[in-house]
């Protein structure tokens, strides 16, 4: 039997910011999504708080088993991370208000620029929190997180996997998403502005790599019941059971494959091109379908065929985009199993 004990409490914003700063409230437990709000969205929240407009309840989990430097228990945020992060950032003068429709005179104001009476109003504004003691069963936190978010802002597939399929392999995917060569190939140079990072798409692309290599893409058969999202989720669940040695092998293979692709194909190795009058026109510097084709093929040729240099085959790969079937396999409904098979196998043939 799983039980959830709850307690309602109200914190004023000054107190809650202090608790976050001291680490008493942990904003980023491992099952949480990354901060996705832009400054305009955050500004609208601050405007609502100043106007005393009610905002949704914050759900906190009481983690009494975590050591802290204070006598208080540490809390982690189950639901409300985006709101609390916005409040913390504004109180720390990280951004100025923008896009306000009602309190237009406050646009471009930082927290420190507000008149004293508004600073007091914000500091004394309270928000309702529900503290949940879920220490009897740690999975309860994950269940609550999924249930709360399923009816609000839609989670991306990888954000939900991060909540549900926790484990060593999930941690490895997050770690490898920071690999320098991988990030350059994905055209990621600013975490704050990159939507791939905000939505955990960079982590999902790492998962795609491990789900496709060693001919495993052949195991994906799209059905009415299961699609590509489920295929990736099943792979994550299975690979969370791998041993530390097996995970280290996967890590080394990923890092080495990205290094070789960056070396032999350049920063735009995963770019997509279109054939126009027998010449190639760049369509995008990164395309995830092209990633499937090139990353999977290179890995399998490196580790199954002993081929470690593709520089002489770069033109052969680029010329594939003049093949209408290959181009179509990277376009439209590119998650069709037949398209995945075609683009990977044509790439493998061109690189051998």
Image (cartoon, helix red, strand yellow):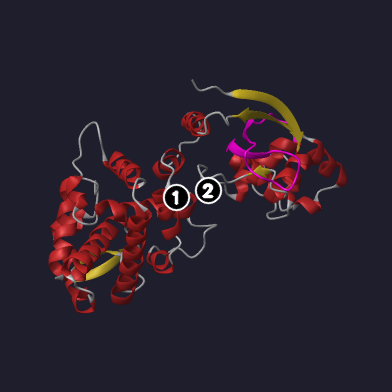
Decide if residue 188 is in sight here: yes
Name the spot of residue 289 as percent of width and height, x first: 27, 55
Q: Residue furthest bottom?
A: 312
Name the spot of residue 320 as percent of width and height, x first: 17, 66
- Report crowding for label 2: few under 14, some 14 to 19, many 20 or more residues within 10 A (C-alpha): some
User: What residue does disc 2 label?
Assistant: 34
Nearer to the camera, 256 or 120: 256
Report if the CB atoms under discs 1 and 2 are less than 8 Å apart: yes
Decide if residue 97 is in sight here: no
**Residue 38 in the image: above or below residue 352:** above
Residue drawn 27% across and 68% down?
281
- Quadrant (top left/top right/bottom left/bottom right) for the C terminus: bottom left
**Residue 96 in the image: above or below residue 57:** below
**Residue 243 in the image: above or below residue 117:** below
**How far separated are the C-alphas under marks 1 and 2?**
7 Å
Q: Which mark is residue 209?
A: none
Name the spot of residue 102 as percent of width and height, x first: 70, 38
- Report crowding for label 1: few under 14, some 14 to 19, many 20 or more residues within 10 A (C-alpha): many
Q: Which residues are magenta?
A: 51-80
Q: Earlier in the sequence, mark 1 or mark 2?
A: 2
**Residue 298 in the image: above or below residue 87:** below
Whether residue 66 is in magenta: the answer is: yes
Residue drawn 57% across and 30% down?
134
Secondary structure, magenta segment, majority class? loop
| Label 1 residue SS | loop
Tell me how many marks there are. Answer: 2
Q: Residue furthest top?
A: 1
User: What residue does disc 1 label?
Assistant: 200
Nearer to the camera, 30 or 189: 30
């Amino acid at each position: 039997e799983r039980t959830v004990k709850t307690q309602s409490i109200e914190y004023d914003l000054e107190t809650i910011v202090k608790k976050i700063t001291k680490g008493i409230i942990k904003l980023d437990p491992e099952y949480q999504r990354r901060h996705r709000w832009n400054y305009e969205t955050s500004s609208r929240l601050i405007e609502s708080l100043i106007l005393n407009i009610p905002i949704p309840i914050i759900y906190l989990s009481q983690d009494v088993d975590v050591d802290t430097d204070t006598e208080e228990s540490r809390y982690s945020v189950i639901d409300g991370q985006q709101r609390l992060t916005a409040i913390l950032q504004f109180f720390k003068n990280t951004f100025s208000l923008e896009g306000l429709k009602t309190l237009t005179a406050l646009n471009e104001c930082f927290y420190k620029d507000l008149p004293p009476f508004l600073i007091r109003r914000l500091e004394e504004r309270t928000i309702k929190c529900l503290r949940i003691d879920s220490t009897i069963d740690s999975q309860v936190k994950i269940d609550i997180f999924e249930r709360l978010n399923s009816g609000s802002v839609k989670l991306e597939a990888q954000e939900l996997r991060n909540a549900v399929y926790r484990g060593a392999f999930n941690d490895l995917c997050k770690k490898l998403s920071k690999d320098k060569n991988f990030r350059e190939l994905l055209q990621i140079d600013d975490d704050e502005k990159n939507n791939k990072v905000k939505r955990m798409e960079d982590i999902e692309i790492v998962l795609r790599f491990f789900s496709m290599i060693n001919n495993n893409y052949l195991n994906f058969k799209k059905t009415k019941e299961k699609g590509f999202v489920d295929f990736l989720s099943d792979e994550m669940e299975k690979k969370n059971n791998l041993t530390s040695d097996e995970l280290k092998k996967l890590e080394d293979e990923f890092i080495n494959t990205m290094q070789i692709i960056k070396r032999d194909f350049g920063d735009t190795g995963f770019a997509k091109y279109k054939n126009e009058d027998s010449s190639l026109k760049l369509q995008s510097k990164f395309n995830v379908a092209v990633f499937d084709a090139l990353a999977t093929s290179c890995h399998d040729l490196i580790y199954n065929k002993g081929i470690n240099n593709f520089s002489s085959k770069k033109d052969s790969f680029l010329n594939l985009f003049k093949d209408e079937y290959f181009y179509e396999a990277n376009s439209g409904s590119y998650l069709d199993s037949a398209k995945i098979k075609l683009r990977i196998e044509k790439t493998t043939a061109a690189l051998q």
